[in-house]
Image: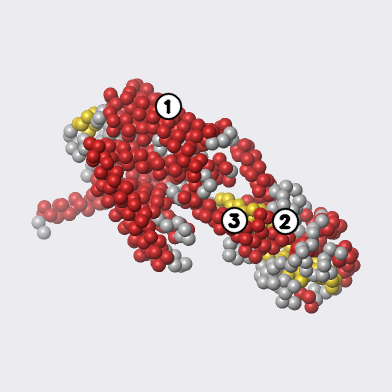
Amino acid sequence: MSAALLGAARSSDSLAALTFIDIAIIVVLARLAGNAMRWFRQPAVIGEIIVGILLGPTLLGAFPGHLTTHLFPLDVRPYLSDIAQIGLVIFMFLVGLEVDAKLLRGRARLAATVSLSSIAVPFGLGIAIAFSLHGSHHLVPNPTHLTQIRNVHLLPFALFIGASMSVTAFPVLARILAERGLYRIPVGAITLACAAVDDVAAWTLLAVVLAVVSGGGAGHVVLVMVEAAAFFAGIMIVVRPLLRWAVTHFHRDEGLAPELMVIVLAGILASSYVTAEIGIHQIFGAFIFGVAMPRDGTAKFVSEVVERLESVALILLLPVYFVVTGFSVNVRTISASGVGQLGLILVAAIGGKFLGATFGARINGLPGRRAATVGVLMNTRGLTELVILNVGLSKGVLDMQLFTLLVVMAIVTTVMTEPLLRLVYPDRLLAADVADVERQDAGRGGYRVLVYVGDLAADVPILGMAASMFARESEERVNVSHFVVRRKHRVSGMAGDLAEMADLLDQLGRLCRAEGGDRLHAGALFTDDIERELRDQVARLDIDCLVVGPGAPEALVSSLLAAPPADVLFARRLPATTAQVVAMAEEGDDAPAVVEVAARLAIARGLPLVLVAASRGGQRRLGQCAERFRTLLPAGVQVAAALDSEHSTDPGTLVVSGAEMADAPVRVRSGEDAARIGWEERVTRVMTLRPASTGASS
């Protein structure tokens, strides 16, 4: 091999080595900055963006010797740029994946109205300020010939500025809603639905703007939009059914098949190529492919796809995108006139989005403070804005100075969201609204019951049991809760988690209606600690009885039974049909609760109630209880003396016990406060129940 070829090979190896160490530095610093932002209640992506800017000419390039060039040589930057583009298209796929029609359920008209006004007002203000900005930013380096300067016409320039004012960062907004618990109240669900519509509308608007930017007259614009529409139709009509078939064919319970992951990755890249060839931008292909991914019955598949892509591609590749962006941002070059322009941009961006979204919410009936909350949340821009601005820079619409000003706007509007939200919608008001919603869900007065559902399939029998035991009057309902453990390290946001929760609530709601009609109310929420949230919910709703089914984790059941926050019922192996109910009441604080639960079950089903005493000393008390119950139960009440009663071994027996018994389908443990409710009060409370006219299966 010649010396020249050896030198070229060494040069290539050297560039590869420099690229690797640069990526390592970027990833570490981005993660540190992202974690630091969480201390200030800010999205991690803000820290990553700021690190990318500081590694460019804004800070590192200000030191003697221009350290940015030494750390990121010009020969390495094309490699970093290509890597950044891969991270970008994967991110856009995830953004599209998080746009789920389930988020719009029951709110489509409201979401469309708010989204339209929240886009139209800032878009109009953006066009208005473009007339002022165009004079000092119309000369832009030609993206295809950087040594040439071209004159950007006012129309494409104004349209792009308007579009950049109109965007909302859907993933970041979803993260804020989940972290603060706003998804639990109507204003949060409304905002998420509005942001979903806004996301699709903003990207569609940008595609139209880019068609205009590409030039060639009205005919060319129409051709580009027709081709883009044909591509979208082809994806939804042809590709989506194939994807649904592929998921059904390849996906197995043991995990995501490699072949399916290949299909997903190839689809992302191929779709990006097609839209780039059409003449809009590669990000649109990835976004549309994400929107087209099947949702129904594929929650596990979608979750695994997101987990695999985020764990490597976004954590490794997307921070490189921020640094490549930072090469084009130099905050030190902002002049006095630039500060004035920045103020104008902030007024148009913040004021337009806030006024548009707030107005749309108000005309749809939201009260002033809650409408303002929608306006504050819709101002979140984050990484989505950065993507749009980079598109404008790459298409030659923006110069470096205006690009810098707009990047600063993106950071400011995202950082301000959290503190402004706490000002407009403080924690005390949020807590009060959550409590109001929960109280309405719980019904009024009477005996309050909470059912924890850990596994939909395993815990179905306890829903019918709870409904027949406790829901006596129309205004009294049983709360049924399922908790989703929060995934803290999501890069793209939590909209996918929220859509998954919406799907889960839909399934749980159908089960509740099937098992208990209107008597069971389904709910779900994110939590970092299921047991703590259960105990908090028991306290907030003044729960009398907590029901836990076989789908609950064993550690959770053990902990709740060891220190019950209320009467805790652990139900397992319920018989398919019930002929009688047996209460095995030992001496101690739990005995009255055991008898009460057994009596409720028996009365609800019109079944015989058998009271079994653990000792002869307790038989007298059970005999007195039996006399009081006997007139309520059509089939009567029996009293036995020993634990090995023949009644407990009958196959049709539903055994209720306070002891740790292998053959007890329902185990009752009385809470500390509930233990003070003695025999007389519990029997009196049960006497208010009405016997069922017909028996019911447990």
Q: Is residue 374 above or below residue 27?
A: above
283 is higher (above) or lower (below) than 692: above
Mark 3 or mark 1, which is nearer to you? 3
Amino acid, disc 2:
Ala
Which corner quadrant of the image does residue 657 belong to? bottom right
Q: Residue at x 79, y 78 (%)?
A: 646
Quadrant assignment for the C terminus: bottom right
Amino acid type, mark 3:
Gly
Q: Which residue is mark 3?
A: 509
User: How many angstroms separate mark 3 from mark 1 (CA)?
Assistant: 44 Å
Tag 1, which secondary structure?
Answer: helix
**Looking at the picture, how far across and down is residue 287, in whole percent?**
36, 49
Q: Position of residue 604 (x, y in %)?
A: 75, 63
Q: Which mark is residue 347?
A: 1
Residue under numbered circle 2 = 471
Crowding at dot 2, Cα within 10 Å, few <14 / some 14-19 / many 20+, comes out as many
Q: Is residue 450 visible?
A: no
| Position in image of residue 641 (x %, y %) | 85, 73
User: How far apart are the two marked residues, 2 and 3, measured between alpha carbons?
Assistant: 16 Å
| Badge 1 amino acid | Val
Foreground of the two, 507 or 48: 507
Q: Residue 480's image quarter?
A: bottom right
Q: Residues within 10 Å of mark 1 (few under 14, many from 20)?
A: some
Q: Secondary structure at mark 3?
A: helix
From the viewer's perspective, is the residue at label 2 or at label 1 nearer? 2
